[in-house]
């Protein structure tokens, strides 16, 4: 089951993606606590998330075990990979935050995370010759239905066209990042840690002017608490989660990646009930079960169909 170019088994890649999706889901709760403890804005938080995540990755990089035969990738190719991935990440994050401000959290989440799997499935079919199949299409449809029930089940949402367009732009950035990571993983010579660090560096540079305009340094009466929260955001849902994401996305089919990452809103919903004390609703339970069932179905299909993944691009 190992991917022939990176050496990472597909089963382990699936596990990496599941952990990454669950870790991403904790970012929203942590961000809410950051906003309670300070006047930090979303773009500044995104900047510090990537910048501090980059510092953490560079700090632990010398501690990582080295492969027996390290691959020497040309500098130009590394720079192109970091630039394109970082730009996709910057568009994904910034357009999503802007969509939330324009049309609300629920609609922005449904459009961004709902359009992502559809765009990725189409892009993977056209550019990577990855077939989704009827079972896979049904799983994607089930996951999107679960997402809609989970996020919109409470009602009271307002749809604004400009916010929807921003959410679609965010989904396009996510799609490009996922497809390119998969393409490079099939071509070989990938290093998830290096890809993540390069993407964070580019994203931080892209976000810096917007963060400066918003207010880079927050005011707070609880600096210790704020620092701990920022360290958590940088370490778990950023450095750890994106490192696992780039490693797993290189060996798992793109459509499967996009659906597994829908574990983010599931994780966020569970945290909202358990940690933040929100009420458990029928929509929360139904949407969570639909999405978890879809993720499980695609994961089983991914492990059982190694031949389909071997189809050349």
Image: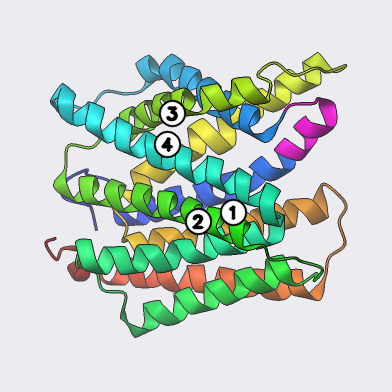
Instruction: Read off the residue under disc 1.
Output: 264
Residue 76 painted magenta? no
| Element at label 1 | helix
C-alpha span from label 2 to label 1: 6 Å
Dividing the image into 4 quarters, which one contains the C terminus?
A: bottom left
Residue pictured at 46% horizontal, 37% vertical: 90
Q: Do the residues labelled 3 and 4 touch (CB within 8 Å)?
A: no
Residue bounds of the magenta highlight: 31-40
Picture disc at residue 261:
2
| Element at label 2 | loop
Query: Compared with residue 290, is residue 251 higher up or lower down, i.e. above or below?
Result: above
Residue 69 can be seen, yes or no:
no
| Element at label 4 | helix
Q: Where residue 101 sits: x, y (%)? A: 69, 47
Picture disc at residue 247:
none
Q: Of residues 108 and 263, which is closer to you in this image?
A: 108
Residue 163 can be seen, yes or no:
yes
Q: Of residues 186 and 15, which is closer to you in this image?
A: 186
| Element at label 3 | helix
C-alpha span from label 3 to label 1: 20 Å
C-alpha span from label 4 to label 2: 14 Å
Q: Of residues 71 and 221, which is closer to you in this image?
A: 221
Would residue 185 appear left or right of 302 to someone viewing this image? left
Q: Are marks 3 and 1 in contact (CB under 8 Å)?
A: no
Residue pictured at 74% horizontal, 51% vertical: 271
């Amino acid at each position: 089951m190992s991917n022939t170019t990176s050496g990472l088994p597909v089963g382990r890649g699936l596990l990496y993606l599941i952990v990454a999706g669950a870790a991403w889901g904790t970012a929203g709760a942590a961000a809410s606590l950051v906003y309670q403890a300070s006047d930090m804005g979303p773009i500044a938080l995104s900047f510090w998330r990537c910048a501090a995540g980059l510092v953490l990755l560079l700090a632990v990089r010398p501690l990582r075990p080295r492969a027996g035969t390290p691959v020497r990738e040309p500098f130009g190719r590394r720079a192109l990979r970091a630039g394109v991935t970082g730009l996709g990440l910057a568009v994904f994050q910034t357009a999503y935050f802007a969509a939330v401000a324009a049309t609300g959290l629920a609609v922005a989440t449904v459009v961004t995370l709902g359009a992502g799997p559809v765009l990725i499935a189409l892009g993977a079919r056209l550019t990577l010759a990855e077939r989704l199949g009827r079972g896979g299409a049904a799983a994607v449809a089930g996951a999107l239905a679960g997402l809609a029930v989970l996020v919109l089940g409470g009602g009271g949402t307002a749809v604004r066209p400009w916010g929807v367009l921003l959410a679609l732009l965010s989904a396009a950035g996510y799609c490009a990042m996922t497809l390119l990571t998969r393409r490079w993983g099939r071509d070989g010579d990938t290093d998830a840690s290096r890809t993540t660090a390069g993407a964070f560096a580019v994203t931080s540079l892209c976000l810096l002017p917007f963060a400066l305009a918003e207010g880079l340094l927050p005011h707070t009466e609880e600096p210790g608490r704020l620092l701990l929260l920022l360290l958590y955001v940088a370490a778990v849902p950023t450095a750890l989660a994106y490192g696992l994401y780039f490693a797993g996305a290189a060996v798992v089919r793109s459509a499967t990646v996009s659906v597994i990452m829908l574990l983010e809103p599931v994780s966020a919903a569970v945290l909202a009930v358990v940690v933040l004390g929100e009420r458990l609703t029928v929509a929360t339970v139904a949407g969570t079960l639909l999405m978890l069932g879809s993720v499980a179905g695609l994961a089983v299909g991914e492990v059982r169909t190694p031949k389909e993944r071997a189809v050349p691009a």
